[in-house]
Image: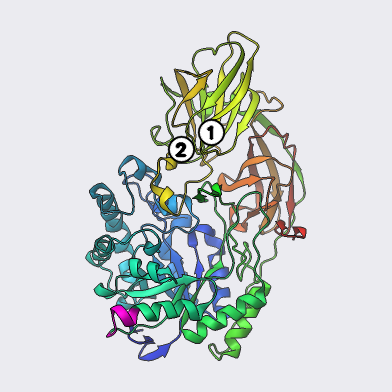
Amino acid sequence: MKFTVHDQFYIDGKPTKLISGAIHYFRITPGKWRQSLHNLRAMGGNAVETYIPWNLHEPEPGVFNFSGIADLPQFIELAAAEGLHVILRPGPYICAEWEFGGYPYWLLNRTKRVRSRDPQYMQAVADYFAVLLPKLVPYQSTQGGPVIMMQVENEYGSYGNDKAYLAAHAALMRRYGIDVPLFTADGGWLPMIASGNLVADGLIPMLTFGSNARESFGELTKYMQSAYPEVSYPKMSMEFWDGWFNNWGKPAVQRSPVETAREVWAVLAEGSINLYMFSGGTNFGFMNGANFSDQDGYKPQVTAYDYDGPLTEDGNPTAKFSAIRDLIADMGLAGDLPAPMISHPVAYAPVTADQRVSLFNTLATLAPTPVVSDRTLTMEELGQGYGYVLYESVDPIRGGESRLNIEDSTDRIQVFCDHQLVATREYQPTSWHTALTVPESDAHLQLLAENQGRINYGPAMISPMQHRGIRGGVRQDGAYIANWRHYSLPLQHPDGIDFSQDWAPGQPAFYHFQFRIDGEPQDTFIDVAGMGKGVIFVNGFNIGRFWEIGPDLTMYVPFDLLRRGMNEVVVFETEGRDVGVLRFRDRAVKITEGSGENE
């Protein structure tokens, strides 16, 4: 297969309109990849697009991961088997509502400014690309593979205008063997297009938008006719936003299938499209990102990332899928299409917790060697990327009535005095305080800080806010409290929990459940309504965060995380709720605008 780009996209010399869909392999467990890829083909798609998150593939400096959910080559091969071309977006910055925009946390210890020509940053990128890109070279269409294009950086025009920075990334990709066409993608607004393109180096300028295709493409045409009148490239929306992501505590965002299909038609009438998202998947573990603005403050995204796209979180077609499939057929852009692949989630029987233990009573096994410092340390200083840090005062605090201040933190922090909850601090841009009553003279403070997700977009990405934990210390009546034990709780896996210890009401705690599956495992959803806040592990895999404020009142469990026979679920709950029973649903339940719960 020969792929070339001139005034149009050509495959084996034939003009071709690309109908692509975004499927993030890292948001879908490997057993579910084929369903989403097949359903993209069943809708009429001929290409799949995916970002590549650096923090998944190099979680620690020089430690690389390309197995399991990180097996990108296997995903590419499955896409090819489904007859799909592949478009890759390796960043290294990807945004994507993903933790730190795809950057590994340890970059915060290495460089003062990501997305810049800082030598330490660029060396880290080069070291990463030297491992990643050679794995992708054999899959390029120039070598007989399915990968037809790759992106340089991501929406850089909304962030900066350093063309030398973009050119350096393109040069790195060429150095490590990438020879398929390269492109940039920016918002459909003239200043963003002008700042983010690299047309001078032969890169195809593409756009990101969710409506008004004619106006956005018109902005691109205006720019090209002015700056590069001799150059002609095909038009493509590399991100057509067919839905949107969600934040905690707000109704789930929804977009009409009819209105979405109408806007898709407008894009296809002008050029090619990549639906963002086609199959959104899940922010497993602690990998959700966050947004920040002076108006709205810090807003982390939720675990479910279905994006209200053509497929549900578990990979099944929606009304939006049918509307777009019908549109593609009506426009004569696809021949006979296969039937979609449907899975059937089940609601397993409720199970009762067989073990439980308070967090404070299992610290000795969860974090047996706490770090002691005269000041509060950040996660990054502790060599920790995600999860929680428990700060405990080494010395007793002063008794009586006082005022406690926490200085400079982006995290959600629960304040305990001798393991009894005093107050909970949500994000605030300024110093936060609470009244503190200490009845005993030998009382100690415990502060549980949760990294709810680093910012993935905008100038705050390079602010001190990205360093998690307590940055500025803790004061009692104006005096800094010195000497702290730091218990690192990354909770990537439920290892080290001592369920033989005691449980106490009103404290963060772990709950253990077991249930048997006699037949083949099927997808399911855990009902988290009323369960408080925390994370859930299924057979050792962290499926993500839950929070009763919604909009998601269930958590998705893919079938390939389950097994025939006995299965184990561990719930870590931080609000002191007694999670005595685990219930399952056969579909997602969300809070939607104006309709309450929606299944």
Give the residue drawn at x 58%, y 48%.
Answer: 544
Q: Quarter holding the N terminus? A: bottom left
Q: Nearer the viewer, residue 493 or 157?
A: 157
Tell me, for residue 296, which label it has, or none. Answer: none
Residues drawn in magenta: 224-230
Horizontal and vertical percent position of residue 273: 48, 78
Tell me the SS state at disc 2.
Answer: loop
Secondary structure under badge 1? strand
Q: Is residue 554 above or below residue 485?
A: below
Q: Is residue 19 visible?
A: no
Is residue 238 something that shows in the picture?
A: yes
Residue drawn at 27 percent across, 76 percent down: 202
Looking at the image, what colour scheme do you see?
rainbow
Whether label 1 touches label 2, CB < 8 Å: yes
Give the image location of residue 287, x and y in percent. 50, 49
Q: Inspect the image, locate mark 2, and give the three-letter code of the amino acid beneath it.
A: Arg
Question: Residue at coordinates 56% horizontally, 67% vertically from top-left?
Answer: 279
Viewer-nearest residue: 388 or 189: 189
Horizontal side, residue 221 vs residue 505: left or right: left
User: Label 2 crowding class (10 Å Cα cut-off): few <14, some 14-19, many 20+?
Assistant: many
**How far across and down, in percent of the image, does residue 599 sit?**
74, 61
* Nearer to us in this view, 315 or 476: 476
- Residue 49 highlighted magenta (yes or no): no
Residue wearing tag 1:
449
The picture places residue 71, in percent across and down from the top left corner, at: 43, 59
307 sits left or right of 128 in the view: right
Q: Quadrant of residue 556?
A: bottom right
* Dot label at residue 468: 2
